[in-house]
Amino acid sequence: MIFYSSVNLILIAAAVIPAVALMVYVYRADKLEKEPTPLLWRLILQGIISTALAVFTERLGAQLLSGFLRSNTLLYQIIFYFLIVGLSEEGFKYLLLKRRTWDSPFFNCRFDGVVYAVFVSMGFALWENIDYVVMFGLQTAFVRALTAVPGHACFGVFMGAWYGLAKSHERHGHAKYSRVCRNLAVICPVLLHGLYDLIATLDDSRLSSVFIGFIAVMFLAAYWTVKRLSARDRYI
């Protein structure tokens, strides 16, 4: 029993550490004004809640889609990964992010949008990762630490970049531009998430290099976005 508990603790630690490391990185990149710890904990919780909501809608969506298309067709996979998985996961992240932070008095810098979105995304990834790692073991933890967890962080970075810009436009009375940026805060991560899942699951060995190239470019773009927005952060 003690050995079994120790193994579970090791698996959970392996699942949690990558998400925590990415949250610490983004938190430290917030140079202008640190966000309050209670708010960040609530955002992690919102990410965990969004996981449960996404699981429900994905299962329902898969059942409905199976009534119209066979699951082994390319059209099914495109619709499933972009409109069901991508939209469910990133959509719920965004809805809970906006509900918790849009009117917060602490949301007073553009980079805050990145911090908030990444913490919600890491709450999602953390909970999802625990589920996968406990079921499939340490090898899965290693693979997901290099792919899925930083993938969710990237989706959060791009969501947060547009979200912070939307708040800036809203503060300056540019309602139209704010609405466009809020839409892009959902559309951009949905498209990236859908493409990530689609390439990763297509049964074609030739796509392995494409997938590696895709995640490398996405990771570098997210890293550059964090560095640039952190260095140019300002009050809004």
Image (cartoon, grey):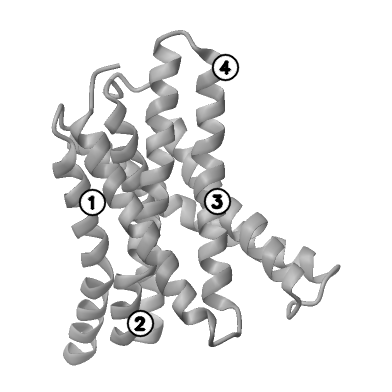
The span from disc 4 to disc 1 (Cα, nearest Å) is 31 Å
Q: Amino acid at mark 2?
A: Thr
The span from disc 1 to disc 2 (Cα, nearest Å) is 21 Å
The span from disc 4 to disc 3 (Cα, nearest Å) is 22 Å
Q: Amino acid at mark 4?
A: Lys
Disc 1: which residue = 23
Q: Residue at x 19, y 59 (%)?
A: 21
Mark 4 or 3, nearer chain start: 4
Q: Nearer the viewer, mark 3 or mark 2?
A: 3
Q: Residue at x 18, y 33 (%)?
A: 231
Q: Say if mark 1 contacts mark 2, CB within 8 Å.
A: no
Res 15 visible: yes
Q: Residue at x 56, y 52 (%)?
A: 191
The quadrant the N terminus occupies is bottom left
* Mark 1 secondary-structure assignment: helix
Disc 4: which residue = 176
Disc 3: which residue = 190
Q: Which mark is residue 140?
A: 2
The span from disc 4 to disc 2 (Cα, nearest Å) is 44 Å
Mark 1 or 3, nearer chain start: 1
* Mark 4 secondary-structure assignment: helix
Mark 4 or 1, nearer chain start: 1
Q: Position of residue 128 (x, y in %)?
A: 41, 66
Label 1 environment density (alpha carbons within 10 Å; few <14, some 14–19, many ≥20): many
